[in-house]
Image (cartoon, grey):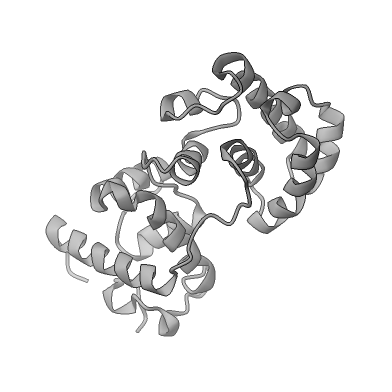
């Protein structure tokens, strides 16, 4: 595809978004949660782990530690046993307890609603904060860039950058704010089902006509 201007890229990106939204009307976070704190815990556990595995662990975890107050005083040994199958369980257990303690000590037991305050909590970086803000509070402060979003952003010609931080900036410039949160869900769904890592299924792709990497 020849080099396109900003306006043309935005128009193409908008068309791709609309087509993906039609293809995946139920696209949303796969992490099961009942409140913002549970989503924060599940997102921390999802690092280097599948959402399916996290969802197998969190019912037991949330029954035992139902809120920040309970988790703040959790035994690391017991917590590690519950979350063991998610991988990196020792560091995750420490992060969860320290995060819960900070929420209790600094925020009265309630998760803060700002990017700056969330990213100051142990275990919560910008990606996790974006997940919480967009999905639990309905606040579009950024775009979640995971491995699927990173891969598709390159293939679809949304960004030529290599790091999640720079890719996020490109996506925020390309799409209107109200689309930042659903955008990541749409790209993740499409990346899991069609635009897979090893051999994308271009013949099944609803946006192939607008994709510079398509084999069709």
Depth check, front residue: 191 or 175:
175
- 55 horizontally vs 205: left or right: right
- 108 horizontally vs 175: left or right: right
Depth check, front residue: 31 or 93:
31
Image quadrant of residue 113? top left
* Rendering coords of residue 5 (x, y %): 13, 59
Q: Relative to 86, is 148 above or below?
A: below
Depth check, front residue: 210 or 111:
111
- 46 horizontally vs 147: left or right: right
The N terminus sits in image quarter: bottom left
Q: Relative to 178, is 68 above or below?
A: above
* Rendering coords of residue 127 (x, y %): 48, 40
Residue drawn at (50%, 58%) of the image: 28
* Rendering coords of residue 146 (x, y %): 49, 51
- 134 horizontally vs 78: left or right: left
| Residue 205 appears in the picture as rendered | yes
Residue drawn at (55%, 19%) of the image: 107
* Rendering coords of residue 82 (x, y %): 82, 42
The C terminus sits in image quarter: bottom left
| Residue 5 appears in the picture as rendered | no
Q: How many marks?
A: 0
Residue drawn at (65%, 55%) of the image: 50
């Amino acid at each position: 595809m020849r080099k396109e201007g900003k306006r043309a890229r935005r128009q193409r990106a908008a068309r791709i978004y609309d087509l993906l939204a039609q293809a995946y009307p139920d696209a949303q976070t796969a992490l099961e949660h009942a409140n913002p704190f549970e989503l924060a815990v599940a997102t921390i556990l999802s690092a280097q782990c599948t959402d399916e595995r996290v969802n197998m662990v969190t019912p037991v975890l949330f029954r035992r530690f139902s809120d920040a107050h309970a988790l703040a005083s959790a035994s690391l040994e017991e917590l590690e046993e519950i979350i063991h199958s998610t991988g990196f369980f020792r560091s995750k257990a420490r992060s969860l307890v320290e995060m819960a303690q900070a929420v209790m000590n600094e925020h009265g037991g309630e998760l803060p609603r700002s990017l700056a305050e969330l990213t100051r909590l142990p275990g919560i970086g910008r990606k996790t904060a974006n997940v919480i803000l967009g999905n639990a509070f309905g606040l579009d402060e950024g775009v979640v860039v995971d491995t699927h979003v990173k891969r598709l952003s390159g293939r679809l010609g949304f960004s030529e950058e290599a790091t999640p931080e720079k890719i996020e900036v490109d996506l925020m410039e390309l799409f209107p704010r109200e689309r930042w949160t659903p955008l990541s869900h749409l790209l993740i769904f499409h990346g899991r089902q069609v635009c897979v890592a090893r051999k994308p299924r271009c013949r099944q792709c609803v946006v192939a006509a607008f994709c510079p990497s398509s084999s069709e």
